Image (cartoon, grey):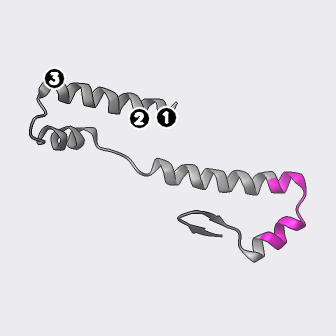
């Protein structure tokens, strides 16, 4: 099973295997593919403390504006996980 940036590439061997599968086995294979994709998304994370520090270094961004920016970022990250 190979993966590309633009999606999942179905190998010839898996394609042939799928043709002969029953519904339960196909459901299992599709679930595994989905879970692999979900794991790869979860593996990328953002360190909010580092992000806050870096944004705080930008000229013209004061403490109040920094708090507003961080609130928006945290809201976006929390809505993504729900």
What residue would you read off at disc 2? 77
Q: Is residue 48 above or below residue 37?
A: above
Apparent side of residue 21 relative to residue 69 in the rendered image (left or right): right
Mark 2 and mark 1 in contact? Answer it, CB < 8 Å.
yes
Kindly state the secondary structure of the residue where label 1 is placed.
helix
Residue sitting at the far front: 60
**Which is more toward the observer, 78 or 28?**
78
Between marks 2 and 3, how big is the CA–CA gap? Answer: 20 Å
Percent position (x, y) of residue 27? Answer: 79, 51
Q: How many marks?
A: 3
**Going from the N terminus, do you reach mark 1 or mark 3 first?**
3
Q: Residue at x 53, y 51 (%)?
A: 39
Task: Rate crowding at label 1 as few (under 14), some (14 to 19) or many (20 or more) other CA atoms within 10 Å.
Answer: few
What residue would you read off at disc 3? 64
Of marks 2 and 3, the one in the foreground = 3
**Which is more toward the observer, 45 or 58?**
58
Task: Rate crowding at label 3 as few (under 14), some (14 to 19) or many (20 or more) other CA atoms within 10 Å.
Answer: few
Q: Is residue 12 above or below residue 75?
A: below
Apparent side of residue 1 relative to residue 64 in the rendered image (left or right): right
> Is residue 19 covered in magenta?
yes
Kindly state the secondary structure of the residue where label 2 is placed.
helix
Q: What residue span does the magenta drawing correspond to?
A: 15-26
Between marks 1 and 3, how big is the CA–CA gap? Answer: 26 Å
Between marks 2 and 1, how big is the CA–CA gap? Answer: 7 Å
**Going from the N terminus, do you reach mark 2 or mark 3 first?**
3
Q: Residue at x 71, y 69 (%)?
A: 10
What residue would you read off at disc 1? 81
> Is residue 2 covered in magenta?
no
Kindly state the secondary structure of the residue where label 3 is placed.
helix
**Which is more toward the observer, 60 or 64?**
60
């Amino acid at each position: 099973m190979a993966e590309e940036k633009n999606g999942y590439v179905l190998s010839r061997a898996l394609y042939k295997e799928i043709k002969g599968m029953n519904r339960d086995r196909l459901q299992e294979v599709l679930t595994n593919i989905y879970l692999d994709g979900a794991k790869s998304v979860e593996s990328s994370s953002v360190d909010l403390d580092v992000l806050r520090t870096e944004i705080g270094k930008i000229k013209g961004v004061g403490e109040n504006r920094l708090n507003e920016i961080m609130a928006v970022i945290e809201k976006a990250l929390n809505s993504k996980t729900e």
